[in-house]
Image (tube, helix red, strand yellow):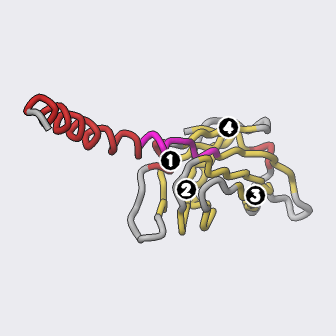
């Protein structure tokens, strides 16, 4: 192998080594879609909220949970609560319902994701992906977002 070939091979190897972390990041890219899908009153006068959580990434999570703030019709925060979504493997969609006791749906103007309460990967490490990849939407009259 000539001197020039040896240098070219080393430069190529160095470029490949630098590119690998970016390739892994691109592979992990995706989104964590959280949709407020339905809001319906219960016979007890509560609001039953149906959420669809879709892990549209290549990452698996043993525990996912979000802290949300609930606003009344006047724009005042009436509650801070944690919604537990549990484990979500890569590509998994999960549907969950939460009842807001003594809160009619008509009294809720919006719900805001305040923070991530848990985004734990199988090895026990916390991931920032649940917030950085979060896409929030609503199919109801209640606004839902970040």
Mark nearer the viewer, 2 or 3: 3
What secondary structure is found at the residue carrying circle 2? strand
Residue in front for this viewpoint, 31 or 17 = 17
Please identify the quadrant where the C terminus is shown: top right
Residue marked by disc 3: 95
Q: Disc 2 to disc 3, how far (Cα)?
A: 15 Å
Which numbered disc, 1 or 3, marks the residue that appears first in the sequence? 3
**Residue at 57% in and 51% down:** 68
Residue pointed to by mark 4: 137
Q: Residues within 10 Å of mark 3 (few under 14, many from 20)?
A: few
**Could you say where residue 37 lies in the image, as x and y percent from the top left?**
78, 45
Q: Which residue is mark 1?
A: 114
Disc marking residue 51: none
79 lies above or below 87: above
Along the viewing direction, whichever of 2 and 116 lies nearer the viewer: 2
Q: Which residue is mark 2?
A: 66
Is residue 112 shown left or right of residue 126? right
Q: CA distance from mark 1 to mark 4?
A: 14 Å
Q: Any magenta on residue 50?
A: no
Judged from the image, the secondary structure of the residue bearing numbered disc 4 is strand
Q: CA distance from mark 2 to mark 4?
A: 14 Å
Query: Where 29 falls versus 102 (above or below)?
Result: above
Asked if disc 1 and disc 3 are in contact, CB closer than 8 Å, the reply is no
Sooner in the amino-acid sequence: mark 4 or mark 3 = 3
The boundaries of the magenta stretch are 25-33
Q: In screen coordinates, is 132 left or right of 143?
A: left
């Amino acid at each position: 192998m000539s001197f020039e070939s040896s240098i070219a091979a080393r430069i190529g190897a160095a470029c490949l080594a630098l590119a690998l972390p970016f390739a892994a990041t691109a592979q992990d890219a995706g989104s964590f879609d959280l949709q407020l899908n339905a809001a319906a009153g219960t016979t007890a006068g509560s609001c039953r909220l149906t959420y669809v959580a879709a892990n549209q990434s290549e990452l698996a999570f043993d525990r996912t949970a979000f802290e949300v703030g609930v606003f009344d019709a006047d724009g005042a925060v009436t509650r801070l609560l944690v919604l537990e979504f549990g484990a979500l493997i890569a590509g998994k969609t999960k549907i969950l319902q939460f009842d807001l006791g003594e809160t009619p749906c008509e009294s809720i103007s919006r719900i805001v994701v305040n923070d991530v309460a848990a985004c734990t990967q199988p090895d026990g490490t916390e991931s920032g992906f649940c917030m950085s990849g979060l896409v929030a939407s609503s199919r109801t009259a209640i606004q839902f977002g970040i």
